[in-house]
Image: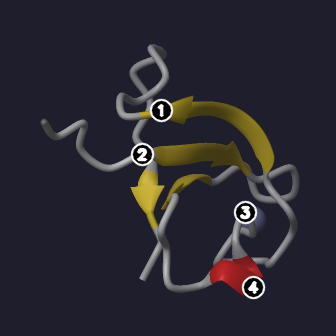
Amino acid sequence: MSYGAYFMYYKCPKCGKRFKYCLDAEKQNEFGQCDTCHAVGVLVGEGCKEPDNNMEYEDISD
Ligand SMILES: [Zn+2]
């Protein structure tokens, strides 16, 4: 049985970018950081489905 990828969803406190990391992301040492300004993101949700607020979360796991 497959549950699909598990994501952590963040919003950047500096630039407001919304992004997500796959739980088994390659970038473990940057996990949770914005890829634009490198601020540590505010966790807004986690799971296999996006938080229900109609916002796009960019996958920056790779
Ligand atoms: Zn940012």
Q: Residues within 10 Å of mark 3 (few under 14, many from 20)?
A: many
Residue furthest front in the image? 1
The C terminus sits in image quarter: bottom left
Name the front one of labels 3 and 1: 1
Q: Which residue is mark 2?
A: 6
Q: CA distance from mark 1 to mark 4?
A: 20 Å
Is ligand 1 closer than 8 angstroms to the Cβ of mark 4? no
Q: Secondary structure at mark 3?
A: loop
Q: Secondary structure at mark 2?
A: loop
Name above or below for residue 47 compared with residue 7.
above
Name above or below for residue 18 compared with residue 53.
below
Q: CA distance from mark 3 to mark 4?
A: 9 Å
Q: CA distance from mark 2 to mark 1?
A: 5 Å
What label does residue 47 carry, if any? 1
Cβ–Cβ below 8 Å for labels 2 and 3?
no
- Looking at the picture, tell me which residue is in the foreground, 12 or 6: 6
Q: Could you tell which of marks 3 and 1 lies nearer the N-terminus? A: 3
Q: Which three-letter amino acid code belongs to the residue tagged 4?
A: Asn
Q: CA distance from mark 4 to mark 2?
A: 18 Å
Q: Which residue is mark 4?
A: 29
